[in-house]
Amino acid sequence: MNINFEQAWDDMITRLESWVDQLIINLPNIILSIVVFILALILSKYISRLTLRLLEKSKLQASMKNVIAKLVSVLVILSGLFLVLGILDLSKTLNAILAGAGVAGLAVGLALQGALANTYSGIVLSYIKQIKFGDWIETNDYEGEVVDLDLRAVTIKQPDNNLVYIPNKLVLENAIKNFSTTAQSRVILECGVAYESDLEFVRDLVNKTIVKNFDPVESVDDIIFLYTEFGDSSINFEVRFWIDSTSALEVLKAKTEAMIAIKKVFDENDITIPFPIRTLDFPKKVVVGTTEHPN
């Protein structure tokens, strides 16, 4: 028992001494490795800032520029780490790390297919001109202003100030309606007047009202006025005109102002906007019913 304990103690002392000897021998390499890794950390920061400066002239989104700069910084740090492993003569460890990274990368790629698809879609969206910060867009049944675009989702702010986060993959695969690609937007207003109304007078009155209340509309030639149908209780019309705005919210405001102005002039000229009604036409002789009294 005592012999085994003494043998074990001697083996432990011998191994510790060998470790100390290896530490002393490799001390310069260890110090050099620490210096190299620190330099890699410092260099990654400078290269990240340099990358941001180089990307300032590009048309990428601000969020994408930051992401690219961070990726470059991570690559510099990884390069420094691999260099440290080489200095410490840990080539076998480096090979094991690379092999493990390959297997882990395959497993992570299979598990994160959706996330990777969003990442790829985010990179593509950052290059196309159809969508950028400040644009008012409609996609996937959501409408609002683009306030952010990263590797995961497109963030839009709706007219009610709510934020909607749409995965990049859905935005890239579905139609995008961009209201900000032109300098103007069209306002479309539908209404109806009573059947006894003078249709020509109604048309002229509506056109003059639009010209009077909206500066971008210089004359009645800039307005499209169309009677669309004989409705159940009214003759319906549609009026279209342009405003100097690409915001859907401004379009709604202009439509509201147009409705107020048209309703006001209709009231002043005794023009009726009828609500749905049903007319019952009874013949002159109507037999309501007969009642027979028993004797």
Image (spheres, helix red, strand yellow):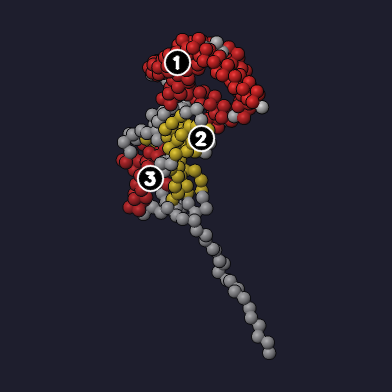
Look at 31% across and 36% down and name the residue there. 215
- How many C-alpha atoms fall within 10 Å of the one at disc 3: few (<14), some, or many (≥20)? few
Inspect the image, locate mark 3, and give the three-letter code of the amino acid beneath it. Thr
C-alpha separation, residue under disc 1 versus residue under disc 3: 68 Å
Q: Which residue is mark 2?
A: 166
For this rendering, which residue is in front, 246 or 50? 50
Q: Find residue 61 and report its horizontal and vertical position in percent.
A: 43, 24
Q: Which mark is residue 34?
A: 1
C-alpha separation, residue under disc 1 versus residue under disc 2: 44 Å
Secondary element type, mark 3: helix
Q: Which mark is residue 267?
A: none
Viewer can see residue 1: yes
Inspect the image, locate mark 1, and give the three-letter code of the amino acid beneath it. Ile
Inspect the image, locate mark 2, and give the three-letter code of the amino acid beneath it. Ile
Q: Which residue is mark 3?
A: 256
Where on the picture, by quarter, is residue 159? top left
Q: Earlier in the sequence, mark 2 or mark 3?
A: 2
For this rendering, which residue is in front, 71 or 60? 71
Where on the picture, by quarter, is residue 42? top left
Q: Residue furthest bottom?
A: 295
Q: Quadrant of the N terminus?
A: top right
Where on the picture, by quarter, is residue 17? top right
Q: Is there CB contact under 8 Å for labels 1 and 2?
A: no
C-alpha separation, residue under disc 2 versus residue under disc 3: 30 Å
- How many C-alpha atoms fall within 10 Å of the one at disc 1: few (<14), some, or many (≥20)? some
Look at 57% across and 71% down and name the residue there. 285
